[in-house]
Image (tube, rainbow, N blue to C red):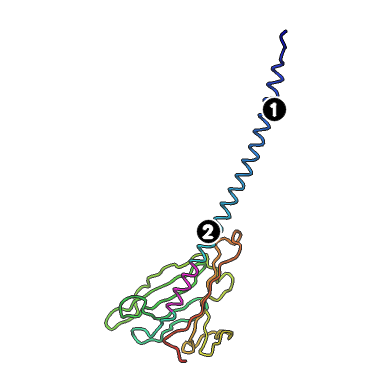
Amino acid sequence: MKHHIDRTWVRGMSLLEVSVVVGITLVILMGAGTFISLSFKDQKILDDQLYGQREARRIVTEITNVVRTAEASSVGSYPIATATTSTLTLYANIDSDSLRERVRYWVTGTELRRGILKPSGNPLAYTGTENVTVLAHDVENIVKGIDTFQYFDENYIGTSAPLPFPIVLPNVRMVRVVVQIEKEESRSPVPIRVESITQIRNLKTN
């Protein structure tokens, strides 16, 4: 005896099962996609933070090294030419010759820049155009009211207040450098802040 099979019912169940499987698969794929997207986003933020920390440390280290070796210019000027909260100009021999370059660090907007001017002519003079390099972007010092440079005299013992402005240049013996960077405030967990204080070796009196 032949049994009649309702093929329409079988086909209907098969389509329902397929629909359920497809729906579950889509939910899983969407969840996985969201997870992967968030993971990449978090990794990008972490990578940006690590890169920013390395760059900030490198920049502050460079500045403090130049400050440490500051000396009288090649024409006899005082080692420090300008000392404000956002600009520091000094003389130091930063290359392999015997001349002392004029090195200027300053913050403008959200950029930290360095300008280098080598003396030239006979007699020597610091004229001409600086060779300017942008050392860092996304610098928050001006926006957040943070002093990039602070200055201390020979009495500094670690907790002393910085010298008041305007700075009397011959009183300066130590310089603190502070750089705060934040690429995207809405994404960064915390801003990157690096600071260091160094003594001007050639002005040391004790």
At 39% from the left and 84% from the top, the residue drawn is 71
Q: Which of the two labelled residues, at mark 2 and mark 1, occupies the earlier sequence position?
A: 1
- The percent position of residue 129, horizontal first and vertical second, equals 36, 73
The kind of residue tagged 2 is Asp
Query: Relative to 131, is 35 on the left or the right?
Result: right
Q: Nearer the viewer, residue 3 or 134?
A: 3
- Asked whether residue 60 is drawn in magenta, I would say yes
Residue 67 image-quadrant placement: bottom left
The kind of residue tagged 1 is Leu
Quarter of the image where the N terminus is located: top right
Q: Is residue 7 above or below residue 84?
A: above
- The percent position of residue 157, horizontal first and vertical second, equals 55, 87
Q: Secondary structure at mark 1?
A: helix
* Residue to which mark 2 is pinned: 47
Label 2 Cα neighbours within 10 Å, binned few <14 / some 14-19 / many ≥20: few
At 43% from the left and 76% from the top, the residue drawn is 104
Query: Relative to 98, is 143 on the left or the right?
Result: right
Q: Is residue 168 above or below residue 64?
A: below
Magenta stretch: helix, strand or loop mostly: helix
* Residue to which mark 1 is pinned: 16
- The percent position of residue 72, horizontal first and vertical second, equals 38, 85
Q: Secondary structure at mark 2?
A: helix
Q: Residue furthest left?
A: 122
Distance between mark 2 and mark 1 Cα atoms? 46 Å
| Highlighted magenta segment, given as a residue range | 55-66
Q: Is residue 204 above or below residue 179?
A: below
- Asked whether residue 92 is drawn in magenta, I would say no
- The percent position of residue 34, horizontal first and vertical second, equals 62, 46
Q: Nearer the viewer, residue 17 or 61?
A: 17
Query: Relative to 121, is 19 on the left or the right?
Result: right
Label 1 Cα neighbours within 10 Å, binned few <14 / some 14-19 / many ≥20: few
